[in-house]
Image (cartoon, grey):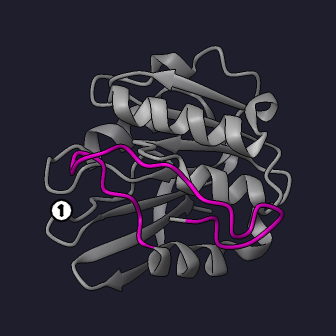
């Protein structure tokens, strides 16, 4: 797996051994970032269920100001830390070991609100809605935040959630990528 574009284009990313982490495919990542194109530069990014950190790292490569990576699996956390160190991103990033399914209180001390959030939870575990609800209620979202969720087509989103409504949704085989934005 490699960074697709930006200043880190072509750089390799480490992934945990085994099947516990399901990294976003290059095709989905490329499509996702083509859609977001102009909305990445200088953003404060949150990567939930970060796995390898590929989504947050791709955003950093394309000009995001900072990124916070949250996961609870030790192999995933080790891979994220290794990737950030090898890519020279440790100064603009933070890695948090946290069970997102319970709450997102770990974000209460974030120095700034997040304007771009990626969520890529394990498929068909029914954790999309609890995690999205925790995200909205934790107070860490900027007023114009955009939330991008990669999830199974068999685990649909109920919306609106707080002020967030579904702005767009794309299908990639059995995967849906949902773009949520503040409703006006």
Specify the segment rendered in magenta: 2-25
Is the magenta region chiefly helix, strand or loop? loop
Secondary structure of the residue carrying tag 1 is loop
Q: Can residue 101 be seen?
A: yes
- Is residue 46 in the magenta section? no
Query: Picture quarter containing residue 133?
Result: top left
Q: Which of 169 and 16 is in front in this view?
A: 16
- Tell whether 128 sits left or right of 111: left
Query: Picture quarter containing residue 74?
Result: top left
Point out residue 25 in the picture as x, y percentages from the top left corner.
41, 71
Residue appearing at x 46%, y 62% in the figure: 165
Residue at the spot of label 1: 155
- Is residue 23 in the magenta section? yes
Position of the C terminus, as image quadrant, is bottom right
Q: Which of 108 and 29 is in front in this view?
A: 29
Residue appearing at x 65%, y 81% in the figure: 34
Q: Nearer the viewer, residue 27 or 175?
A: 27
Point out residue 81 in the picture as x, y percentages from the top left corner.
57, 31
Residue appearing at x 73%, y 75% in the figure: 37
Crowd rating for badge 1 (residues with CA inside 10 Å; few <14, some 14–19, many 20+):
some
Q: Which of 161 and 35 is in front in this view?
A: 35
- Tell whether 6 sits left or right of 154: right
Query: Picture quarter containing residue 154?
Result: bottom left
Q: Can residue 72 be seen?
A: no
- Tell whether 115 sits left or right of 154: right
Point out residue 180 in the picture as x, y percentages from the top left corner.
50, 62
Instruction: Classify 21 as above or below 101.
Output: below
Point out residue 120 in the picture as x, y percentages from the top left corner.
38, 53
Count of number-bearing discs: 1
């Amino acid at each position: 797996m490699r960074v697709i574009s930006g200043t880190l284009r072509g750089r390799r990313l480490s992934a945990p051994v085994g099947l516990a982490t399901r990294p976003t495919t290059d095709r989905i990542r490329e499509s996702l970032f083509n859609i977001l194109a102009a909305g990445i530069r200088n953003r404060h990014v949150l990567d939930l269920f970060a796995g390898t950190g590929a989504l947050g790292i791709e955003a950093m490569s394309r000009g995001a100001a900072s990124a916070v990576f949250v996961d609870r699996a030790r192999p995933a956390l080790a891979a994220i830390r290794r990737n950030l160190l090898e890519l020279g991103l440790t100064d603009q990033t933070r890695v948090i070991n946290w069970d997102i399914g319970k709450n997102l209180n770990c974000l209460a001390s974030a120095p700034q609100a997040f304007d771009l959030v990626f969520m890529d939870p394990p498929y068909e575990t029914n954790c999309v809605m609890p995690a999205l609800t925790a995200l909205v209620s934790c107070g860490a979202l900027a007023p114009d935040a955009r939330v991008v969720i990669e999830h199974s087509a068999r685990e649909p989103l109920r919306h609106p959630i707080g002020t967030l409504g579904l702005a767009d949704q794309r299908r990639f085989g059995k995967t849906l990528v949902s773009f949520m934005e503040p409703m006006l």
